[in-house]
Image (cartoon, rainbow, N blue to C red):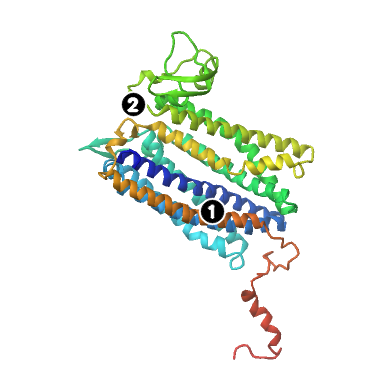
Amino acid sequence: MFGLTALELARIQFGFTISFHIIFPAITIGLASYLAVLEGLWLWKRDTVYRDLYHFWSKIFAVNFAMGVVSGLVMAYQFGTNWSYFSAFAGSVTGPLLAYEVLTAFFLEAGFLGVMLFGWNKVGPGLHFFSTIMVALGTLISATWILASNSWMQTPQGFEIINGIVVPVNWFEVIFNPSFPYRLAHMTVAAFLATALFVGASGAWHLLRGNDNRRVRTMLSMAMWMLLVSAPLQILIGDLHGLNTLKHQPAKIAALEGHWENKPGEAIPLTLFGWPDMEKEETLYALKIPRLGSLILTHDWNGQFPGLKEFAKEDRPNATVVFWSFRIMVGLGMLMLLLGAWGLWLRWRDRLFDTNLFLRFATVMGPTGLIAILAGWYTTEIGRQPWIVYGVMRTKDAVSNHSALAMSTTLVAFIVVYFIVFGIGTRYMLKLVAKGPEDHEHEPTDDTGARRPARPLSAAPDQMDMFVPANHDRKG
């Protein structure tokens, strides 16, 4: 297909499926924590706004959660079908880590998800809130195990190779490998950012359409507070993550900076834009800021770090791709910071909800959190090449013995099925968002504050009481 090898097609196929999958867990992580905050505020303040927002976003969470589970199952199967040599070589590490995710996070989510989604009027408020917290905790635990597995592939330790197979000798070192804390923090905050932008865009869109009420305003307000906190935090985490990557994967840093070689005693500029040419071994049309590259990546005005020419050609990642995927991620991050700061200024001037230019900007920024996650993921994974386990196993040695024709056929099938299935699911989820939260502020509630169900069938038994004589023996 298009002159690509089976290896290249296998990489494209895995990249395609994981691009779909990573979107849904990111929103699931953020929305689960958001729902826990909403229910906590409802129990504390008894303000119906938080209760109604909880019911509104729990529907969207359910759809998103289902799509995440389906896409994750498909992705997991590819380790056996397309990357069998990798599974045979490193399965003793990656297999248990994925099993731990199922035994802890997935079982926790599955055990409490039903109570969270359908138990509002069937269990006490304390138990329901506990269920919501457990689901939110489950999403974070799931991310922990997945990031532990991926981080080990980036910075492997705690193992020995015996008879050509990886054997874990220290599970603490396997899990808490050098890049794990930074990747976990970076991904978790990215999920919160993406969710804040999604929620904020929903609120801004409704305000632009004239749907101005307390629920919509609360959505936008909470999203802007979250954005204001998480965007600067993500920049700090990104800086620490970059320093860690420079230490353990210097070729990746050289590629994403488009840096080819050092000159004696000369500081490294920051290349804002350009086109790294892998054949000519230079970055064409480069726009540079003197010394800033040294300052950012070494925290030293005159510091240097290895250039791509210091690595053998077969050990270099594709600088052209990761150079631009990294800049897309960072550029969107700067726009997120701008949106949060603008929101704070408008809040101070009491203009947060009626400045149309800001609301349009917030609406347009809605998908950028997910785009930034994808760009960051491409930077991480493509920047690791040509290794599937960094410095231990090359990607070309991990792929299964499939023909290019077989990989082409399955790739086309994946593309068609994914766009149909997840396109329908995403469209339905966006229709729920467009409907907006319902106003139940004046509906009657029971003693626990739970509103009386509005569905005709569930309300039927109460209505039937009027036909029962007062002295009728109900035991008969």
User: Left or right: 116 with respect to 84?
Assistant: right
**Do tag 1 and tag 2 residues touch (Cβ < 8 Å)?**
no
Label 1 crowd (10 A; few <14 / some 14-19 / many >=20): some
Q: Residue furthest left?
A: 163
Secondary structure at badge 1 equals: helix
> Looking at the image, which residue is at 32% across and 42% down?
93
- The location of residue 310, given as percent across then percent down, is 36, 18
Picture disc at residue 183: none
Quadrant where the C terminus sits is bottom right
Label 2 crowd (10 A; few <14 / some 14-19 / many >=20): some
- The location of residue 363, given as percent across then percent down, is 65, 44
Q: Quadrant of residue 178?
A: top left
Comparing labels 1 and 2, the label whose residue is closer to the camera: 1
395 relative to 118, above or below = above
Residue position for label 1: 426
Residue position for label 2: 315
What's the amino acid at mark 2? Asp
- The location of residue 68, given as percent across then percent down, is 47, 52
What's the amino acid at mark 1? Thr
> Looking at the image, which residue is at 60% across and 64% down?
120
* Residue 299 visible in the current orientation: no
- The location of residue 314, given as percent across then percent down, is 32, 26
